[in-house]
Amino acid sequence: MASLTHLKFRKMTLADLALVNQLENAAHYHPWSKKLLADAINSYACWILLEHQQLVGYAILKIVLDEAELLNIVIAPAQQGKGLGKVLLTKIIKEAQQLGVKDCFLEVRESNSQAYQLYEKFGFNEIARRANYYPTPQGFEDALIMVYSIL
């Protein structure tokens, strides 16, 4: 587990865009575009996680009334498996709760068993499936829809 004393959690700003874009490209073979990330910063609740002042993760949360959808959560590939995903997820759920969110939804690639296990251990429950939703190098794969009841 990462040392929590060297972690800093704060809102993402447009000044973070270049580093967030680099991390997005390193973490995904079908990444969000820089423009889409900039639009998200301007439209949604976005946070970054820093370790020793280095960007190690970020999250983008769309909030509508008392529901939220976790649109994107990324931990730097070299930093995965150290508990940072759980730290970031805990922090964004706490922020969502403070904003009055009752339920948080997300979708995860069927093949992303590491993320699925994190969400399941956290308390998310699978409620649906979207067939052929995510592009892959071989075609498409299903998205698993999960929900976490905050309040």
Image (cartoon, rainbow, N blue to C red):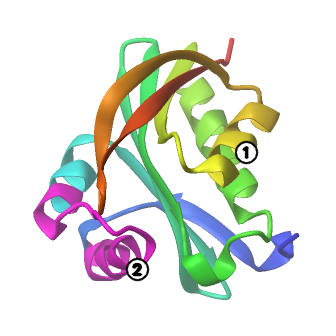
Residue 116 lies, in percent from the top left, at: 65, 41
Answer few, some or many: residues within 10 Å of disc 2's Cα (few below 14, many 20 plus, some between 14 and 19).
some
For label 1, the residue is 118
For label 2, the residue is 26
Q: Is residue 151 above or below residue 46?
A: above
Q: Quadrant of residue 29?
A: bottom left
Residue 69 magenta-highlighted? no
State whether residue 116 appears in this view.
Answer: yes
Q: Quadrant of the C terminus?
A: top right
Residue 25 magenta-highlighted? yes
Q: Is residue 44 left or right of residue 81?
A: left
Residue 3 lies, in percent from the top left, at: 86, 76
Q: Looking at this rendering, what residue extends furthest in the front direction?
A: 138
Magenta-tinted stretch: 15-37
- Secondary structure of the residue carrying tag 1 is helix
How many numbered badges does the structure rendering display? 2
Q: Earlier in the sequence, mark 1 or mark 2?
A: 2
